[in-house]
Image (cartoon, rainbow, N blue to C red):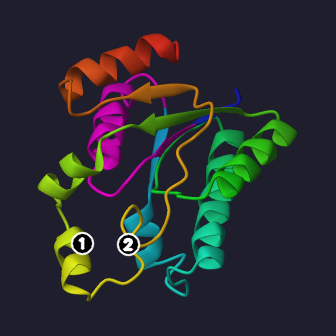
Amino acid sequence: MSIGQTIWFTGLSGAGKTTTAVALVGALTSQHPTLMIDGDVLRAGLSSDLGFSTDDRAEQVRRAGEVAIIAAQQGIIAVVSLVSPNAAARDLVRRRHAEAGISFAEIYVATPLEVCIERDPKSLYARAAQGSVVQMTGVSDPYEVPADPDITIETHNFTTAQIVEQLRVQLKLN
């Protein structure tokens, strides 16, 4: 059995992480076994015990990373869509992948906050402005931009199809 890999999308809420990840999984599934690991889905089950404190967010990232490693060890491409605002938590996941001998690609979805606020698919920014969401990444909680991501994408400048094709080329996914 061949070893899989992890493709990790990080960025603000509304940046286009999940949209891009779902499209990438759709493009890959016919040729590669894939597993979509989405932050919202994790919070509904595996991480339902976590809140949004710095420690809880780091634990959410750690759990997603461990699930991705398990999948990759089974020959699956794990595609993770998770805000993952803390650089140290993302770096820990990268180190764990290296220790396990699994390829890890960090994809920074570099969408400006203004665009994310305009999109606001979950009304989180609107609720943060009203005060009902108090720990909003990019507003009242920090998002640490990756210092050296493997790939940076701009969902506000390209179509999803263009981005998926770019990712397939850069990640050498045929």
Relative side of 81 to 71, left or right? left
* Quarter location, residue 99: top right
Range covered by the magenta-colored residues: 7-32
Q: What residue is rendered at 67% in x and 62% in y? A: 62
Q: Which percent across, then down, holds residue 90?
A: 65, 50
* Quarter location, residue 41: bottom left
Amino acid type of the residue that numbered disc 2 sits on in the rendered structure: Met
Quadrant of the rendering where the N terminus is positioned: top right
On screen, residue 69 above or below 130: above
Q: Which percent across, then down, holds residue 135?
A: 42, 78
On screen, residue 140 above or below 174: below
Q: What residue is rendered at 49% in x and 83% in y? A: 48
Work out how far the residue at label 1 is from the one at label 2, CA to CA, in angstroms. 8 Å
On screen, residue 161 above or below 61: above
Q: Name the residue under label 2.
A: 136
Whichever of callouts 1 and 2 sits on the residue coming sooner in the sequence is: 1
- Asked if residue 11 lies in the magenta stretch, the reply is yes
Q: Is mark 1 on a helix, strand or loop?
A: helix
- Asked if residue 47 lies in the magenta stretch, the reply is no
Instruction: Look at the numbered discs 1 and 2 and tell me whether their residues touch, using CB distance below 8 Å.
Output: yes
Amino acid type of the residue that numbered disc 1 sits on in the rendered structure: Leu
**Image mark for residue 168:** none
Q: Is mark 2 on a helix, strand or loop?
A: loop
Q: Which percent across, then down, holds residue 42?
A: 47, 69
User: Mark 2, residues whose alpha carbon is within 10 Å: few (<14), some, or many (≥20)?
Assistant: many
Q: Name the residue under label 1.
A: 124
Camera-nearest residue between 120 and 105: 120
